[in-house]
Image: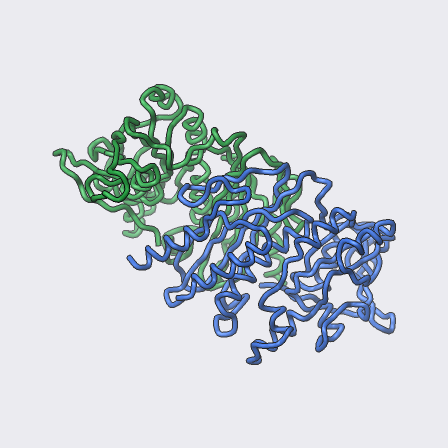
Chain colours: A blue, B green
Amino acid sequence: VRELELIAAIRAALGARGGRVVRSSGDDAAVVRARPFAVSSIDTVVEGTHFRRSTHRPADIGWKALATALSDIAAMGADPGEAFVALVLPGDFEDVLELVASMEELAERTGTTIAGGDVASGPALTVTVAVTGWADSQEALVGRDGARPGDLVAVTGELGGSEVGRRHLEAGRRDGDLVGRHLRPQPRLAEGAALARAGVSAMIDLSDGLATDAGHVGAASGVQLVVRLERLPRPPGVTAEEAASGGDDYELLVTVPPERRTAAQEAARLTWIGEVVAASPAGTDTSSTGPGLVLLGADGARADLRGYEHA
Amino acid sequence: VRELELIAAIRAALGARGGRVVRSSGDDAAVVRARPFAVSSIDTVVEGTHFRRSTHRPADIGWKALATALSDIAAMGADPGEAFVALVLPGDFEDVLELVASMEELAERTGTTIAGGDVASGPALTVTVAVTGWADSQEALVGRDGARPGDLVAVTGELGGSEVGRRHLEAGRRDGDLVGRHLRPQPRLAEGAALARAGVSAMIDLSDGLATDAGHVGAASGVQLVVRLERLPRPPGVTAEEAASGGDDYELLVTVPPERRTAAQEAARLTWIGEVVAASPAGTDTSSTGPGLVLLGADGARADLRGYEHA
């Protein structure tokens, strides 16, 4: 009975009204007043794969699960809307209310309403978050496929800090700026919406690391992104290689038509890291000229780095 | 590499365009052309808690996960829209494409687009489905809180078959109508939308069993639902008690103002099982007169049954 009461409490916490939500907890589904375009994504984090309870506190786990989902909304340039949270709880996990409170804190900071949820028991703590953002037109949104030769490449914030912070955490350190970057990433919602308005041609969030994600933009757009390693912005204690390959920073990478450069720079603090060039047409792909990413080292030679692949 | 290829294949399968979906796979989030009201819910099923791989085939697991989520949309009277699927896959689970194909089959049958997904590894097979349905006005939707004294109570379909089927399955039988009801529940989407249009006052899907779910309608509406056990529609091999307490049928229970009785009966095949009476006001609740459900046995005495509680 105590467990059922707890589940009822969690479900109630995960079913708030407010914002655009006109029905939620107490009904089979939440009802949300829509805007013309819904932008939706789902992300799941699993104990042992994405985090360990020995190093990540419940509040960190909840925060990061919601932050990574919201980052997908940011990367499209949409405004945040609602989140739906499914929790799988092991029998020995007692701090679920701390996990949920942390999600609620981030939701409030970002203007997101947690409008529904589900709770089940299972062997590994699992947090799945489905998020929906909103936009008033398709033109207000930015995909990965709009990069064109001649565009410039830029990123928000600094890269590599989360991955180095993760290693510090595994080595037993819980303090320090880099550990904080790993545990509490900030979804760049305001930046994403402003960059979309400024007319960037493509956008992606850096979840798997620049070396992987910039390649996605190149592949989707049929172009080559040429990025210079030494230009990558990075915090103290992070090498250029770590900045290129480390995942989980959740900064945004954009491609920007030259005439939009000033507008983009006014929309968000950007570092310019490269440019877009034409790729060989399909069928004539080679590793050096096909669509994707080319990373150049300080000597101008190609650097061969892979991003962080999520399991 | 083979695993990454598989994950890429699953992600692509879980990111179809079509219907209202104008962007999906290949971008950070799906973009959906909205209607005025979005109706959303999230459901998670976990190996060992909701199913066992020894008794449930991958295709059954995928079907049921999507069916239960769609049932929440049906219970609001909304039209089906999009689904987002997060999979947690154990290393020894090889039939994920069969699981996904089954979800795609149900999606196609119901007019749902699977517009996004995520895949992670973990110790227990877990399928989380977030669904969104659509409606053109708030008045077109039905909650749990609209039942009023004098309304009639009805259900679609037959009850208890899924729970008895589950027991057959655990006893080693895989054939038979009741096992099929357990493994492949049918979300009552057309019935739910038609009943909403017919003016039912409250609606809920019977996931935890009538004894539990009818109580939710009574509690949310501040009324008492009086239901007669012997009127419960049930397939051969199911007792009235099993029909009242068995979960996972995913039929709909509605309350119907008397003047809407004919319209409701034309909207869906219904069995009339009871009526709504006034409950004692809050503060004077007693177990016999407070808001909720009263189940009456054949002798007219109260039957004390509890529904099936999902873990």
- Of A139 and A46, which appears nearest the observer? A139
- Of B4 and A139, which appears nearest the observer? A139
The residue lying furthest to the front in this view is B283
Q: Is residue B188 left or right of residue A35?
A: left
In this view, A85 is above or below A22? below
Residue at left offset 27%, top offset 46%:
B307
Q: Position of residue A159 (x, y in %)?
A: 71, 67
Q: Position of residue B93 (x, y in %)?
A: 48, 59
> Total label count?
0
Residue at left offset 45%, top offset 43%:
A24
| Residue B3, image quadrant | bottom right
Residue at left offset 84%, top offset 53%:
A262
Residue at left offset 17%, top offset 41%:
B303
Q: Is residue B52 left or right of residue A195?
A: left
Q: Is residue B261 left or right of residue B288?
A: right
- Of B77 and A268, which appears nearest the observer? A268
- Quarter of the image with the N terminus of chain A is bottom left
Residue B203 visible (yes or no): yes
Q: Position of residue B184 (x, y in %)?
A: 40, 42
Q: Position of residue A179 (x, y in %)?
A: 61, 73
In this view, A256 is above or below B204? below
Q: Is residue A304 left or right of residue A12?
A: right
| Residue A288, image quadrant | bottom right
